[in-house]
Image: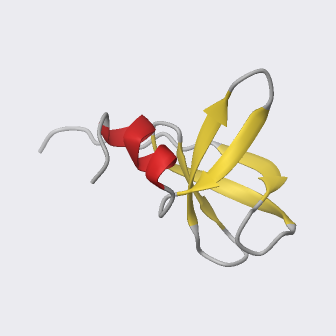
Amino acid sequence: MKNLTIDSLIVHGICPGCKELAALVSILNNVYKCTNCGDELIQHVNGVIKYLPMNNKKARKIVYGKEK
């Protein structure tokens, strides 16, 4: 059996889903899950750090390279 390494990052930010300060846990590179409401968010850095809901077309384009 090979070694399994899991790296996660926990950050604090304002979740756009529940509009509260929450702990956000990374589940993929630049994709986070809110521990309050469970929304999946993408971290978008453009001078300031913003978290966009994954149901947002712009967020899906950032993650997948195209709108799905």
Q: Quadrant of the C terminus?
A: bottom left
Depth order, front residue of 11/31: 31
- Colour setup of the view: secondary structure
Q: Residue at x 49, y 58 (%)?
A: 54
Quadrant assignment, res 4: top left
Please indicate whether residue 46 sits to the left or right of residue 42 in the image: right
Point out residue 28 in the picture as x, y percentages from the top left corner. Answer: 43, 45
Please indicate whether residue 64 sits to the left or right of residue 26 in the image: left
Please indicate whether residue 39 sits to the left or right of residue 3 in the image: right
Q: Is residue 68 visible?
A: yes
Quadrant assignment, res 24: bottom right
Point out residue 66 in the picture as x, y percentages from the top left corner. Answer: 29, 39
Point out residue 22 in the picture as x, y percentages from the top left corner. Answer: 81, 63
Q: Residue at x 75, y 62 (%)?
A: 15
Location of residue 17 with respect to 49 vertically, above or below: below
Depth order, front residue of 43/4: 43
Q: Is residue 5 visible?
A: no
Location of residue 25 with respect to 61 vertically, above or below: below
Location of residue 64 with respect to 24 vertically, above or below: above
Point out residue 62 in the picture as x, y percentages from the top left corner. Answer: 44, 36
Please indicate whether residue 49 sits to the left or right of residue 66 in the image: right
